[in-house]
Image (tube, helix red, strand yellow):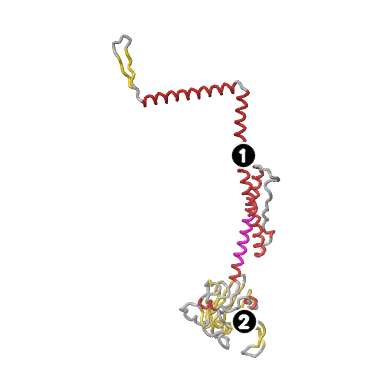
Amino acid sequence: MQIILVHPRLKQAKALHITRGWVVGVGALVLFLMAGGTSVLSYFAMKLAVQVRLPVVQQWVAQLDEHDQRRKDRFMRENLDALAVRIGRLQAQLTHLEAVGERLGTMAGVRREDVARAGRGGAVASDSRTPSIAQLDLAIDSLSAGLDRRADHFTLLEFELIERAVRAKLLPGSTPLADGAPGSRFGWRVDPFTGRGTMHEGMDFTAPTGTPILAAGAGVVVFAGYHPAYGNQVDVEHGNGLVTRYAHASRLAVKEGDIVRQGQWIADVGSTGRSTGPHLHFEVRVHDEARDPYKFLQDGLSPRPELAAAKPAAAPPRVPRR
């Protein structure tokens, strides 16, 4: 489109070329100015209405605030309900852990008085209404204290079970021979050399020469050498004055000061010392007083052929007599 502008005295004329883009730009500018003016007028009108406290405007503003507050309250209730459900589940898990802890404590012999019992927890709210923040905070504190007590209880159980496992390894409860027949028991018997009654302070196991002798329990070797009556002898101390003795060996596989584990090869069956034939003389002594080995071995006398593999291929040299 073209517009021609003529001078009033017709001295000259000027042509204006109006394009579609120019028309669109002018229209957009007019609309923007109208919208901006309307917004400014609305703002000042609302501000003035609030200041002069017009009833209709005041009611409309109050409805907006009430709607916003209801939305916030609904959001808060939903989150509190979800938190209450999670706390209830944690309380149920804590109750289950307490029951498991009591059963384990009974099995481990830990009395209930040794640790404070964890609280079982109850309902978070006294009715069906949404619990308050104070109630939830109290429930969380109770759960935290209960979990701390459960942790202490399980720690005590762990220590007790570890100690029991260590004691079981230290006590001489494993057979000293992987495959050997029990012979003379502990007590009074006829001495094979003198023919008179005498006290037999150990337990004999008949086996061929060279049969591996195994430590009945973990401990420290306190003697490994030759004794006129016991022949080649190994004494292993297990703590608290408890010592096991392995006598008449053909050769020794350990020396004084060695730490041995339960079932470890320590010597070979023989007939050294005061002996009538190949066998193992096994003693259990507490503060150097002989005790009946059968009371320690009665649960471990079944043959255990797999322990024979504990003997290494190369044997140490014989321990010289002294």
Label 2 or label 1, whichever lies nearer to me, is: 1
Above or below, 19 against 99 in this view is above
**Magenta stretch mostly in which secondary structure?**
helix
Mark toward the start of the polypeptide (2 vs 1): 1
- Chain part drawn in magenta: 149-164
Which residue is farthest right?
Answer: 126
- Residue at image coords 69%, 59%: 112
Residue 74 numbered mark, or none = 1
Disc 1 residue crowd, few under 14, some 14–19, many 20+, Cα 10 Å? few
> Is 306 or 139 nearer to us in this picture?
139
Q: Does 153 appear in magenta? A: yes
The x, y position of residue 137, in whole percent, is 64, 45
The x, y position of residue 9, in whole percent, is 31, 9
> Is 18 or 252 nearer to us in this picture?
18
- Residue at image coords 65%, 81%: 186
Q: Quadrant of residue 245?
A: bottom right
Dot 2: element: strand
Residue 203 numbered mark, or none = 2
